[in-house]
Amino acid sequence: MTNFFKKHKLLILSLSLIFLLTACRRITDNNSQVLEQYILRLDTPFSVAWKDGLFTALFVYPISLVVNFLATIDFIGAGGSIIITTVIYNALLTKSQIKQQMMTQKQSLIQPELARINAKYEGKTDQQSTIRKNQEIQAIYEKHGINPFASILPLFIQMPFMFAMYGAIQRSYNIINGDFFGVRLSELASNAINFPNAWAYLLIFGLMVVTNFAAFKIPQYLTNKKKKEEGIKDKKYAQDKNAPNPEATLNTTMMFMLLLTSAISWIWPIGMSLYWAVGSICRIAQSYYIYKYHSMKN
């Protein structure tokens, strides 16, 4: 367990920030309803958002304007506004997200070579060995055109929007008072289980869980399929039997994120689950685009 936390410090830090930013100030009453002074309307002036904080003014407020405006259009509505906003966001970040996935695929290809180097220098802690080891690893990255930080940067680009989307859905007037085929988007999944139409809330929650899982597994499946189609074989090198299996580590990370996201989404507005599900579908579409039009040999 200790090794897991060491290897996934960035992931755990990112998810911890979600809790911190959403729990550091209470903006709801005892019934989980947003207090009047924190509700953002289409006519809320920027000065009010600015007084609420820099993050609200620069991130939450602009998204709330878009969401509130789209929700006023009859054929779009509150649920449609969340869907459209999410699709637009993913479209704007498509280039960086595709680059992130491509780097992740390439990193999976070089894992056997990295394992060979780690095995070669196992137990050697002197300065010269450490320098040579780092040089060999860097040479592999350069050979395959891999930037280790390229798969991390999009995460930091996406996180402010994710926090802002949470705030906008939670605080936008037309979302709080809107619905999606009879599902009140401001309700929590945990509160809705006793509603007559509880099945509809559970359907959205379940869709979020399933699409989130699929967004993790499908890229992995398509990567392996692409390897076979392009005749790419994983190189097998002698390595320490106790060395972690990269694929097993990735799967563990996936399950950890899925369980944690599901637990959080049980106690956040169902509109956020709708946003997360649509975002996962967009990532799946991006994975198929990469599989269809990008080669792993490049």
Image (cartoon, rainbow, N blue to C red):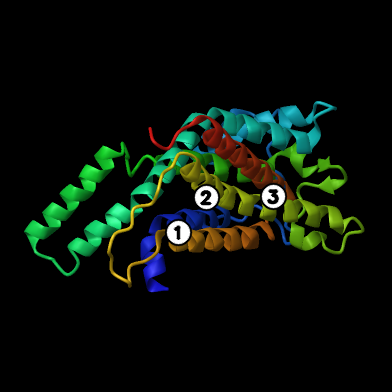
Going from N to C along the chain, the mark reached first, 3 or 1, is: 1
Q: Give the CA distance from mark 3 to mark 2.
A: 23 Å
Q: Quadrant of residue 275?
A: top right
In the drawing, does residue 159 fall left or right of residue 189?
left
Q: The residue under label 1 is which amino acid type?
A: Glu
Q: Nearer the viewer, residue 172 or 78?
A: 78
Pick whichever of labels 2 and 1 is earlier in the sequence: 2
In the image, taking residue 175 as reference, residue 144 lies left or right, namely left
Query: What residue appears at the point 82 percent right and 42 percent down from the top-left corner?
Result: 180
**Camera-side residue of 211 and 229:** 229
Q: Nearer the viewer, mark 3 or mark 1?
A: 1
Q: Which residue is mark 2?
A: 220
The three-letter amino acid code for the residue at tag 3 is Ser
Instruction: Tell me the element at label 2.
Output: helix
The secondary structure type at the circle numbered 3 is helix
How many numbered marks, from 0 up? Answer: 3
Residue type highlighted by circle 2: Gln
* Residue with the most extreme front position: 231
Provide the residue designation for mark 3.
273
Instruction: Verify CB contact (< 8 Å) between mark 3 and mark 1.
Output: no
Q: CA distance from mark 2 to mark 1?
A: 9 Å
* Residue at which label 1 appears: 247
Q: Are marks 2 and 1 in contact (CB under 8 Å)?
A: yes
Q: Is residue 50 above or below residue 266?
A: above
Q: Residue 43: x, y in percent?
A: 70, 28
| Relative image position of residue 185 (x, y in whole percent) | 77, 46
Going from N to C along the chain, the mark reached first, 3 or 2, is 2
